[in-house]
C-alpha cells in the first residue's frame, strides 16, 4: 500500500487514490483528420513497462485533482509526482 | 494429570490456579499460563492428529507458530467453532474444548490410516494424477477425498464475535520482543522516537527469558536475569507502546503493516462474551526493525514423524518455561550445539537423557563440554536410521555415519526412549522481510538465507539476521540499531558476555538409512505428508523450478506454509540437481505469516455495515407504504408497491396501467445530478455530448447521449439550462459517480482552458416525478400560480416555482412517454412535496410506482436504459439513434470512433423491437436469438435486453440486439429455450404512441 504525495494535499494513503493509466498521452486536437491507424494509436495503445513508468493518478477521495506520477513498477518506488501540464522532473 | 510430568519449581506457570478443559471429549486439567500444547503434554498426550494423506498418527512437534502437526478444531458451537488452530498457540482457558481433526472416527482409530499401508501407491501428485481424469468424475472423487481428508470443519452459522480495526502511526515499529527486539525498542524509545513493540506471545523475552545456563551470561548474571531487568526498564519509557499477543500478519510496501492482536483468546469462556475478540492494527511505520528470531529445523530421516518426535528447542521450552517433561527417557538427535542446551535443561530438571546422537565427528565448544561433564552420553558421527512405535515413539535405531556422510556403517544400536528431540540447526525467520519485497542472500557456512537488500526503511537484527551467538546478537543488534536510527546509545557497549561458541558445523539434508532409498519414509512437510522421495520423484519427472516442485508435491503448501519444510526441500533439490542452494533461490513467502480469521479481516464491516446503503429522502414513505425494494448500486430503490396479496407481476401490471390511464408518481431522486457552471459551460456540453448545446435556450431541457472515446454509449440523461452559464445535468443512477469523474478528468487534463465548475448535487435534491394524463391537473392544484399551458410550459422546458414558500425546479420531461413533470426540491423538503402531490392526486387515483413499472413504461416507448440495453459495445448508430449525433460539430468525445472501419460495419448488433407470435409469451432477458434451429452449431444473432408484458398493449414486448437488425424488420426469428422454441418477429423499437401524442395529452 503506497504512500502517495498528492501535489495538492501532501502525503496520503493509497486507498484515497485511483490510478488512471499511462500519462502524457495527449488527445489529438483534430481527430477527424486522423487515419484509423493514427486514431487507434491514441485510443488503444498503452505501455506496460517493468521499470520506470509515467502514470496518471487521481486523488479521488481527497481533492479530486488529477496529477502525474513517476513510478518504478518493479519495486513500486515513486520517484516523483507533479501537476498536470508540468514537464516530468525526471527523464 | 500425570503429576510426575510436571516439575515443581517453575516461575512462569501458576501451579495454584488449575484450569479444566476438554480434549476429544475428555476433561483434563492444566494451569494458568499453559498453552493447550503444554497442558496436553503434561497429561502425557502427544498424539493429537492424523496426517493429511496417509493418516499417520502425528504429535506435537514444536511450541510456536511453526507447529505443523498439532492442529485442532476449537469449540463446538456452530457459529464459533474454529478449525486448523495450532495447540502451541492456544493459551489455556477455563472451558476450552478442542478436538482432533482429519481423523475418523477418532484420533486413536482412524479409517483413513489404511492409506499408510498403500502409501507406495500414493506418490507425489497422486491426487492430481489419479483423480483429475476423466475430468467430470472429479465431483465424485472430491466428495470422498474431502470426507476422509479435510482439514477441520468450517463454522456453519454467522460469527457472533466482535472484531475491530484500528490505524496506528509510529516512528519505529519493532517486530519481536526477544532479546534483540527489547534492545531495539529501548534504544528507540529512549531517543524520543514514538515506538511500538509487538510480540505474538503473552510475554516479552523470547527464548532468553528461560535461558538459565552457565554458558550464557551477561555481566556475571544469567542471561535470563539480565534480560528481566531490561524488560523492567521498558515500563518507564514514555514513548514506548508494547503489544503482546499481537502477531504481525503482513508487511506491505511503504512500511504498511497489518498486525492481529488477540484480546479475548486467553480469557475463560464465560468472560469472552461481548468483548472485542481480535483487533487488526493497520500500521504505518516510518522505520521498521525486524527481530523475529529463528526457527529450529528438524532432521530428515526414516520415520521422523512419530508422535514423541519433537524439536529439541521445544522440549527445552516445555521443561524450562512450562515445567512440563515431554518424556521420562528422552533421546536427542542433532547436527549442532543446540541439543546440548536441551540436554542440560532436562538434566537440571531431573529428566534422564539417554544419549545425544550427533552427526558431527566431535566438537569441543563450551556447552558440549558442560554437557559431557554432566555425564550425558554422545554418539558422535552417528545418525538415527529408524524409529519405532506406532502411536508414540518407543525406540530409535542408531548407526555410524560413513566418512562422506552418504551412508551408514557398522552395527545398529537400538535405544529405548519415549521422546526424541531433533535439531537440524536454525532458520532465520525472514518471512516478513521477503514479504516486504526484500531480497535474500545465502550463507554457505551454515546454510541459511539472510536478509540482503531492501527498498524500505527497515533492518533485521538478531537471529533473524543470522546472528545466533549471544555476544553477536547483542553487539551487532546494538550497532545496527544505532546506525539505523542515527542515535548513539552505548548501554550495550561494554557488557561482559559469555556465550557458547559453536565451532563445528555439519549438515546433511537427507540422512542416510540402512534401508534402500524408496523403502524409507523421511518426511519433509509433516502437514501435507510429502517425503524426500516425493521431491526426488518430482525432479526425476522433470520439474526443475522450486515453485513447480512445491506445487507438484504440495511441499510447503499447508496451513503452516512450510515453515519447517522449505529449507530441506530446497536442500534436497539442490543436492539432487547438483546446484548451489544460493542459486536455486527460495519460494515466496506470502502474507499472512500465520492464518488470520475472516473476522479479523472484515472487522466491523459486516451485516448492514458491509457496504454503504444510500436511501432517498422519500425512503420512509416507501417503507410506510409497503414498497418492495431493489438494490441499484448502493441505492435502495422502491421496486413496486404490492397491495394486499399481489405478487410482483400483478402489482407492476396495475401500476403501469394506472400511470397511463390517470396518474402515477415515482421517486426519481437517485438519478445522478451534476451542477455545471461557468462561462464555457455550453462549449463543455458540446464536447461531452453527441448533440449540439450552444443553441439550447435558457429554461429548456435536452436529452443527451455521452460516449466513450471509443464511440460506445456510456451514459445518458436530460440536461437543463437554468441560466446563461448554469446547467443541471442528470445521469443514470448507476453512472453518476463515473460520469462526474470522467467530466472532471477531461476538464483537468484535456481542456484546462475551459471555465467550467462541476458539483455533484445528487444528494442535495429529491426528485418527485408525476406522470399520466392527469398529471397537469395535479400539479396545478399544488402550484396554482404556474401557467401550465403547452405554450407557456411546453414539453422539454423548466420553471422555477414555489411550493409552500420553498423554491423548487419543475421540469416538464418524460421517461414514460406520458405528459409528465419532475419536481426537484431540497432533500429535506422532498417528502412533504411528495405527500402533497399524493394528496392532490388522490381524486385521480394517483398510483405510486417503482422501478419495475418505470422500466416497463419506458420499454413500451422504446427508450433505452444505458447499461441494460447497452453493454459498452453499442454505438448510437447501433441503437438506431443516429438523430442524436450532431453532423455540424467538429468534435465531441467519441466522434472519431464512430467511423472507424469496425464501427461502420453494417452487420453490427443493433437495437430492435421483438414481438412474440404468442402475445402471452414473455421472453427471458438474456435469451439468445437465432435464425435457424436445425443447423449445428447454431449462429447466435443476438440476445434479448429488455422484456415485459405490457398491460397497456395487452401483449408481450421486448427489446433486443440483433446482428444486422436494422435491415431485418419483419423477419421471423427464434428464441430457443430449454424446453421449447419461441417464435418472434423483429419490429420497430417503439411499441406505443409512435406519434408522441400522449406527451401533450
Ligand atoms: Zn489531493
Image (spheres, coloured by chain):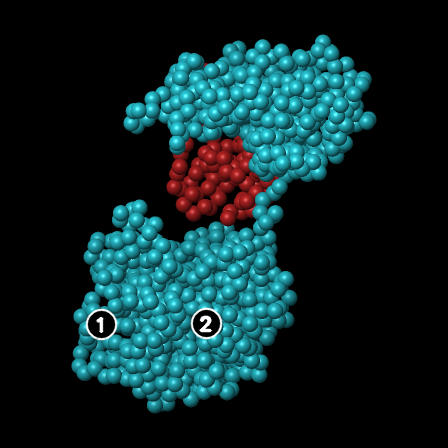
**Residue depicted at x 74% and y 12%:** B789
Q: Is residue B934 visible?
A: yes
Q: Is residue B525 left or right of residue B729?
A: left
Q: Which chain is cyan?
A: B
Residue B173 coordinates in the image, percent (x, y): 54, 60
The residue that appears at 55% across and 34% down in the rendered structure is A66
Q: Colour of chain A?
A: red
**Residue hosting label 1:** B512
Give the vertical position of A21 relative to B166 (above or below): above
Please name the residue shown 81% across and 17% down the image: B785
In whole angstroms, how far apart are the C-alphas of marks 1 and 2? 38 Å
- Quadrant of the rendered structure where residue B772 is? top right
In this figure, which residue is indicated by the disc labeled 2? B24
Residue B119 versus residue B282: which sits nearer the camera?
Answer: B119
Confirm whether residue B679 shows in the render: no
Q: Quadrant of residue B941?
A: top left
Q: Position of residue B637 (x, y in %)?
A: 62, 35
Q: Residue at x 19, y 73 (%)?
A: B515
Amino acid at each position: 500500500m503506497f504512500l502517495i504525495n498528492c501535489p495538492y494535499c501532501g502525503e496520503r494513503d493509497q486507498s484515497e487514490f485511483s490510478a488512471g493509466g499511462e500519462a502524457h498521452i495527449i488527445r489529438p486536437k483534430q481527430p477527424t483528420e486522423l487515419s484509423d491507424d493514427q486514431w487507434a494509436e491514441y485510443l488503444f495503445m498503452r505501455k506496460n513497462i517493468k521499470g520506470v513508468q509515467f502514470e496518471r493518478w487521481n486523488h479521488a477521495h481527497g481533492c479530486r485533482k488529477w496529477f502525474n506520477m513517476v513510478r518504478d513498477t518493479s519495486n513500486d518506488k515513486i520517484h516523483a509526482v507533479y501537476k498536470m501540464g508540468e514537464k516530468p522532473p525526471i527523464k | 494429570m500425570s503429576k510426575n510430568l510436571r516439575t515443581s519449581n517453575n516461575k512462569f506457570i501458576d501451579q495454584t490456579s488449575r484450569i479444566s478443559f476438554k480434549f476429544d471429549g475428555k476433561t483434563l486439567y492444566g494451569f494458568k499460563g499453559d498453552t493447550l500444547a503444554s497442558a496436553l503434554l503434561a497429561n502425557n498426550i502427544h498424539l493429537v492428529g492424523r496426517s493429511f494423506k496417509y493418516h499417520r498418527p502425528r504429535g506435537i512437534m514444536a511450541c510456536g507458530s511453526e507447529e505443523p502437526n498439532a492442529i485442532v478444531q476449537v469449540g463446538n458451537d456452530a457459529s464459533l467453532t474454529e478449525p486448523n488452530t495450532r495447540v502451541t498457540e492456544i493459551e489455556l482457558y477455563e472451558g476450552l474444548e478442542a478436538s482432533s481433526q482429519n481423523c475418523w472416527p477418532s484420533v486413536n482409530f482412524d479409517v483413513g490410516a489404511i492409506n499408510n499401508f498403500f502409501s507406495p501407491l500414493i506418490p507425489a501428485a497422486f491426487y492430481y494424477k489419479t483423480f483429475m481424469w476423466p475430468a467430470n468424475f472429479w465431483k465424485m472423487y472430491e466428495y470422498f477425498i474431502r470426507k476422509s481428508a479435510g482439514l477441520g470443519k468450517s463454522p456453519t452459522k454467522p460469527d457472533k464475535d466482535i472484531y475491530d480495526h484500528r490505524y496506528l502511526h509510529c516512528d519505529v515499529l519493532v517486530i519481536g520482543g526477544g532479546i534483540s527486539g527489547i534492545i531495539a525498542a529501548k534504544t528507540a524509545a529512549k531517543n524520543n522516537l514514538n515506538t511500538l513493540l509487538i510480540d505474538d506471545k503473552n510475554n516479552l523475552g523470547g527464548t532468553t527469558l528461560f535461558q538459565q545456563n552457565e554458558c550464557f551470561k551477561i555481566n556475571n548474571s544469567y542471561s535470563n536475569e539480565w534480560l528481566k531487568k531490561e524488560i523492567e526498564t521498558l515500563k518507564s519509557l514514555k514513548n514506548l507502546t508494547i503489544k503482546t499477543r499481537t502477531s504481525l500478519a503482513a508487511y506491505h510496501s511503504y512500511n504498511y503493516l497489518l498486525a492481529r492482536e488477540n484480546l479475548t483468546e486467553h480469557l475463560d469462556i464465560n468472560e469472552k462474551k461481548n468483548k472485542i475478540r481480535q483487533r487488526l492494527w493497520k500500521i504505518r511505520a516510518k522505520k521498521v526493525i525486524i527481530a523475529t528470531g529463528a526457527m529450529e529445523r528438524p532432521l530428515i530421516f526414516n520415520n521422523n514423524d512419530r508422535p514423541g518426535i519433537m524439536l529439541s528447542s521445544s522440549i527445552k521450552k516445555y521443561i524450562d518455561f512450562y515445567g512440563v517433561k515431554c518424556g521420562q527417557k528422552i533421546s536427542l538427535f542433532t547436527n549442532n550445539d543446540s541439543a546440548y542446551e536441551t540436554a542440560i535443561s532436562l538434566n537440571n530438571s531431573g529428566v534422564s537423557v539417554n544419549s545425544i546422537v550427533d552427526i558431527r565427528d566431535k566438537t569441543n565448544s563450551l556447552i558440549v563440554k558442560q554437557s559431557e561433564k554432566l555425564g550425558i552420553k554422545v554418539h558422535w558421527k552417528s545418525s538415527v536410521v529408524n524409529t519405532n512405535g506406532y502411536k508414540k515413539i518407543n525406540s530409535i535405531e542408531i548407526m555410524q555415519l560413513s566418512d562422506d556422510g552418504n551412508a551408514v556403517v557398522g552395527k545398529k544400536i537400538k535405544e529405548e526412549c519415549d521422546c526424541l528431540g531433533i535439531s537440524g540447526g536454525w532458520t532465520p525467520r525472514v518471512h516478513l522481510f521477503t514479504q516486504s519485497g526484500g531480497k535474500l542472500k545465502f550463507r554457505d557456512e551454515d546454510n541459511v538465507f539472510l536478509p540482503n537488500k531492501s527498498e524500505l526503511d527497515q533492518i533485521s537484527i538478531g537471529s533473524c539476521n543470522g546472528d545466533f551467538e549471544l555476544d553477536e546478537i547483542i553487539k551487532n543488534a546494538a550497532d545496527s540499531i544505532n546506525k539505523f536510527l542515527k542515535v548513539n546509545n552505548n548501554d550495550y557497549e561494554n557488557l561482559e558476555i559469555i556465550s557458547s561458541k559453536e565451532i563445528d558445523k555439519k549438515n546433511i539434508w537427507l540422512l542416510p538409512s540402512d534401508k534402500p532409498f524408496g523403502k524409507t519414509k523421511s518426511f519433509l512437510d509433516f502437514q501435507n505428508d510429502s517425503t524426500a522421495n516425493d521431491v526426488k520423484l518430482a525432479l526425476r519427472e522433470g520439474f526443475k523450478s522450486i515453485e513447480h516442485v512445491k506445487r507438484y508435491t504440495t511441499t510447503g503448501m499447508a496451513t503452516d506454509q512450510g515453515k519447517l519444510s522449505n529449507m530441506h526441500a530446497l536442500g534436497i533439490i539442490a543436492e539432487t540437481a547438483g546446484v548451489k542452494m544460493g542459486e536455486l533461490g527460495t519460494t515466496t513467502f506470502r502474507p499472512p505469516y500465520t492464518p488470520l480469521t475472516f473476522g479479523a479481516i472484515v472487522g466491523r464491516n459486516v451485516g448492514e455495515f458491509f457496504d454503504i446503503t444510500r436511501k432517498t429522502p422519500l425512503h420512509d414513505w416507501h417503507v410506510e407504504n409497503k414498497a418492495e425494494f431493489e438494490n441499484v448500486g448502493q441505492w435502495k430503490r422502491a421496486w413496486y408497491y404490492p397491495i394486499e396479496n399481489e405478487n410482483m407481476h400483478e402489482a407492476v401490471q396495475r401500476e403501469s396501467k394506472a400511470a397511463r390511464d390517470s396518474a402515477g408518481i415515482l421517486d426519481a431522486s437517485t438519478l445522478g445530478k451534476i451542477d455545471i457552471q461557468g462561462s464555457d459551460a455550453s462549449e463543455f456540453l458540446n464536447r461531452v455530448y453527441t448533440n449540439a448545446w450552444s443553441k439550447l435556450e435558457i429554461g429548456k431541457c435536452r436529452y443527451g447521449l455521452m460516449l466513450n472515446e471509443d464511440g460506445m454509449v456510456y451514459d445518458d440523461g436530460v440536461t437543463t439550462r437554468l441560466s446563461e452559464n448554469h446547467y443541471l445535468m442528470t445521469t443514470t443512477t448507476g453512472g453518476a459517480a463515473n460520469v462526474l469523474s470522467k467530466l472532471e478528468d477531461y476538464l483537468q487534463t484535456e481542456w484546462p482552458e475551459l471555465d467550467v465548475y462541476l458539483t455533484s448535487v445528487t444528494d442535495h435534491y429529491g426528485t418527485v416525478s408525476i406522470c399520466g394524463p392527469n398529471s397537469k391537473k395535479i400539479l396545478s392544484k399544488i402550484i396554482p400560480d404556474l401557467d401550465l399551458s403547452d405554450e407557456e410550459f411546453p414539453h422539454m422546458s423548466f420553471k422555477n416555482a414555489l411550493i409552500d414558500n420553498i423554491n423548487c425546479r419543475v421540469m416538464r420531461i418524460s421517461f414514460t412517454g406520458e405528459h409528465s413533470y419532475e419536481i426537484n426540491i431540497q432533500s429535506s423538503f422532498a417528502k412533504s412535496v411528495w405527500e402533497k402531490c399524493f394528496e392532490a392526486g388522490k381524486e385521480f387515483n394517483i398510483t405510486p410506482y417503482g422501478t419495475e413499472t418505470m422500466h416497463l413504461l419506458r420499454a413500451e416507448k422504446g427508450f433505452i436504459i444505458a447499461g441494460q440495453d447497452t453493454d459498452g459495445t453499442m454505438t448510437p448508430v447501433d441503437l438506431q439513434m443516429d438523430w442524436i449525433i450532431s453532423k455540424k460539430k467538429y468534435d465531441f468525445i467519441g466522434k472519431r470512433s464512430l467511423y472507424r472501419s469496425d464501427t461502420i460495419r453494417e452487420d453490427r448488433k443493433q437495437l430492435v423491437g421483438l414481438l412474440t407470435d404468442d402475445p402471452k409469451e414473455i421472453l427471458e432477458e438474456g435469451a439468445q436469438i437465432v435464425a435457424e434451429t436445425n443447423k449445428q452449431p447454431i449462429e447466435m444473432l443476438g440476445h434479448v435486453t429488455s422484456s415485459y408484458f405490457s398491460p397497456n398493449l395487452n401483449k408481450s414486448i421486448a427489446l433486443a440486439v440483433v446482428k444486422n437488425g436494422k435491415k431485418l424488420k419483419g423477419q421471423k426469428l427464434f428464441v430457443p429455450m430449454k424446453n421449447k422454441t419461441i417464435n418472434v418477429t423483429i419490429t420497430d423499437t417503439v411499441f406505443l404512441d409512435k406519434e408522441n401524442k400522449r406527451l401533450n395529452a
